[in-house]
């Protein structure tokens, strides 16, 4: 149980700076997921917490102690690696117990603790096997066991589920969640998979290009994305984004071919904005319905429980997620309807959220 | 499952193997067979046929104290030079594995000694280790008479061991470095997270994982130290002083072509061959068991 405090941390290699001044407070017992596309610096940040990567600037403190200069073993973190990093020449029991052996724990106590961990992870039958003889899910559990046995202050996960097949991933996801509830240890989990991130996180940190874009609960991130990047990165299918300009009676979209009547509170006429709307917030209506945007159907993707309808809006691609039993034929005309409350506005220049249109929505405290 | 190319008729496969078979037959089985034949007969130095003498050649060699001295010298040489060449190479490779700048250059530079012909490098070491003019002359200046491979058998043995090890350090280094680099970085990091320090990590993680390479190099080094030592001995010591460096491979040459005892030399080469075979079998039987293949 420990809190982690990250202050103005940056990381640069010879010529490139990859993490630009990250600030983050992780409270004790929290499960924090760092989400971002590959190359956004999320793994580097995790490895700096672990002590595997030198911190170029700023400080990282675990439980109030600055750990910048401490060796990995002195930080009290345990890590689960993407490729599991099991020692191939050791049995499962030896893999799990290696840290205790290094620490000089007597054999009897070691065996007992290995057994205890193996029981939690249902590895008791496999203790004598070598990692080679294990399936992906079993290896994953051994890697977890190796982290657990040390009873660390902090658990670090570096994309631990990305090597598993889809079904196993869902299963391991819930196992990790259960395990966290049981051990209640501070956990930092890095992933590029948004479903994983949404389902696991107490709090989500979205990173892009070495910067933190937004920190919040999965719900906050989904409903109030702080930037255009977060809006399009979180959610599947991705949020629709249309370029527009503020005009006297609302918004002019797509170079003026479409108009939306929205209150433009505060923004000067002529401001360029990006308007976002989630595919699941759009309703398909009959073409020509008053107040609806008319579009042409491109493609329908059947998902079983629902379907994604891709439409063409004067050359701009737009997707609609519907659970209704409608199957518009490609090429046919449809109307798109949505409420003003579901629109997200972002500055065209900086990409940051503009909340002037929805002054009534409270900004949650972080 | 790997896909294998198969030939529809076995005769086509044989046809492809024929060039290699001819080479091996001409340069290995035929001479080896001849050596076996000669070792069982007495060759006339100026021609004129062979007399069948059975195992007499072997008996006379094995009852000769000089020959046993030569076996001892060879085993000493093989043991120490293999040990030196492998340990030094492993230490260098482990240090280099920590990603020093210019490690690519090292790899090229360090393979060069292996490319130098044994007599050429022996000549260089003969100068370096000369008691009157070389590097060791400085030591002799401080402790007069400390170093003289021309008179002292131990010094002479040390000289050829140094020269041979120098050649094989580079060779071993390349293999060790490749093996170390093949170990996933995350394993080392996982061990570091588990609280293991640099030295401990080496013994617990890296060393066990490079045992296949260590085993391979052990076999090669020992075999080569029995065979590749000829040029070094010939140039540096000629087997002297007082037979102290008369290794088996050199004794075969000197007895056969200097002493004109073809039959005795043939018998010696058979014994050397058997010794290497036995040593190699021994290594595969007893050491390979401790190797972890991934």
Image: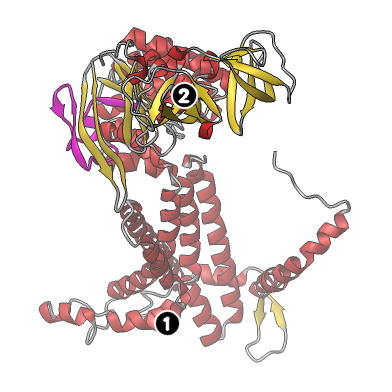
- Residue A184 lies, in percent from the top left, at 30, 11
Q: Quadrant of residue A1?
A: top left
User: Callout 1: few (<14), some (14-19), or many (20+) C-alpha neighbours within 10 Å?
Assistant: few
State the mark number for residue A200: none
For residue A72, side relative to residue B270 (left or right): left
Q: Is residue B155 above or below residue A167?
A: below
Which residue bears the numbered disc 1? B120
Numbered disc 2: what chain?
A
Residue designated by label 2: A276
Residue B44 lies, in percent from the top left, at 65, 86
Q: Secondary structure at mark 2?
A: strand
On screen, residue A52 above or below A311: below
- In the depicted view, which residue is nearer to us: A217 or A331? A331
Look at 45% across and 57% down and name the residue there.
B175
Classify residue B70 by image quadrant: bottom left
Please say if B269 is above or below A21: below
Q: Is residue A58 magenta?
A: yes
Q: Quadrant of the N terminus of chain B?
A: top right
Q: Residue furthest front?
A: A248
Give the side of residue A101 with respect to residue A317, left or right: left
Q: Is residue B177 magenta?
A: no
What residue range appears in magenta? A52-79
- Between tags 1 and 2, which lies in front? 2
Q: Pointer 1 and pointer 2: residues touching (CB < 8 Å)? A: no
Going 49% across and 21% down the picture, which residue do you hit? A260
Q: Is residue B165 left or right of residue B61?
A: left
Look at the image and tell me whether residue A248 can be seen.
yes
Q: How many marks?
A: 2
Residue at (25, 39) in percent of width and height? A10
């Amino acid at each position: 149980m420990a809190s982690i405090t990250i202050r103005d941390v940056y990381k640069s290699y010879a010529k490139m700076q990859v993490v630009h001044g990250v600030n983050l407070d992780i409270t004790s017992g929290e499960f924090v997921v760092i989400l971002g596309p590959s190359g956004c610096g999320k793994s580097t940040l995790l490895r700096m917490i672990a002590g595997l990567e030198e911190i170029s600037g700023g400080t990282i403190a675990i439980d109030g102690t600055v750990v910048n200069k401490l060796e990995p073993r002195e930080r009290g973190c345990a890590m689960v690696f993407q490729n599991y990093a099991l020692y191939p020449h050791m049995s499962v029991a030896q893999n799990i117990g290696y840290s205790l052996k290094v620490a000089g724990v007597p054999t009897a106590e070691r065996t007992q603790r290995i057994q205890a961990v193996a029981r939690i992870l249902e590895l008791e039958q496999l203790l004598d096997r070598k990692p080679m003889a294990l399936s992906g899910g079993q290896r994953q559990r051994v890697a977890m066991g190796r982290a657990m046995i040390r009873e660390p202050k902090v658990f670090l996960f570096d994309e631990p589920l990305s090597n598993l097949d889809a079904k196993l991933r869902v299963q391991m996801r819930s196992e990790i969640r259960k395990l966290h509830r049981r051990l209640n240890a501070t956990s930092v989990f890095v992933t590029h998979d948004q479903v994983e991130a949404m389902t696991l996180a107490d709090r989500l940190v979205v990173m892009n290009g070495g910067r933190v874009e937004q920190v919040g609960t999965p719900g906050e991130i989904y409903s109030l994305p702080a930037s255009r990047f977060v809006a399009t990165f979180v959610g599947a299918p991705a949020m629709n984004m249309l370029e527009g300009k503020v005009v006297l009676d609302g918004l002019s979209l797509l170079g003026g071919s479409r108009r939306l009547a929205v209150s433009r509170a505060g923004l000067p006429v002529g401001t360029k904005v990006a308007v976002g709307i989630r595919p699941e917030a759009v309703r398909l209506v009959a073409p020509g319905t008053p107040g609806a945007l008319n579009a042409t159907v491109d493609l329908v993707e059947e998902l079983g429980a629902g379907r994604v309808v891709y439409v063409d809006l004067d050359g701009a691609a737009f997707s609609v997620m519907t659970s209704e039993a409608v199957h518009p034929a490609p090429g046919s005309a449809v109307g798109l309807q949505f409420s003003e409350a579901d629109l997200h506005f972002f500055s065209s220049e900086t990409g940051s959220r503009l909340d002037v249109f929805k002054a009534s929505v409270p900004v949650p405290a972080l | 499952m790997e896909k294998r190319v198969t030939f529809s008729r076995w005769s086509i496969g044989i046809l492809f193997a024929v060039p290699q078979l001819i080479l091996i037959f001409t340069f290995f089985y035929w001479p080896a067979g001849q050596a076996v034949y000669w070792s069982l007969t007495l060759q006339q130095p100026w021609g004129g046929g062979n007399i069948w003498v059975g195992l007499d050649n072997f008996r006379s060699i094995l009852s000769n104290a000089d020959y046993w001295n030569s076996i001892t010298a060879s085993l000493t040489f093989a043991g120490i030079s293999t040990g030196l060449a492998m340990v030094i190479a492993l230490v260098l490779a482990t240090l280099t594995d920590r990603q020093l700048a210019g490690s690519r250059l090292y790899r090229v530079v360090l393979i060069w000694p292996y490319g130098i012909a044994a007599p050429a490098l022996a000549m260089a070491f003969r100068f370096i280790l000369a008691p009157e003019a070389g590097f060791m002359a400085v030591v002799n200046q401080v402790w007069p008479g400390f170093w003289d491979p021309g008179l002292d058998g131990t010094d002479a043995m040390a000289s050829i061991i140094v020269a041979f090890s120098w050649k094989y350090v580079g060779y071993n280094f390349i293999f060790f470095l490749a093996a170390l680099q093949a170990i996933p970085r995350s394993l080392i990091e996982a061990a570091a997270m588990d609280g293991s320090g640099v030295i401990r990590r080496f013994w617990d993680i890296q060393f066990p994982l490079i045992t296949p390479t260590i085993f391979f190099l052990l076999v090669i080094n020992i075999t080569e130290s029995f065979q590749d030592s000829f040029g070094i001995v010939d140039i540096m010591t000629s087997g002297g002083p007082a037979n102290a460096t008369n290794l088996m491979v050199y004794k075969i040459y000197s007895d056969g072509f200097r002493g004109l005892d073809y039959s005795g030399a043939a018998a010696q080469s058979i014994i050397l061959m058997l010794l290497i075979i036995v040593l190699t079998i021994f290594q595969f039987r007893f050491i390979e068991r401790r190797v972890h293949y991934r």
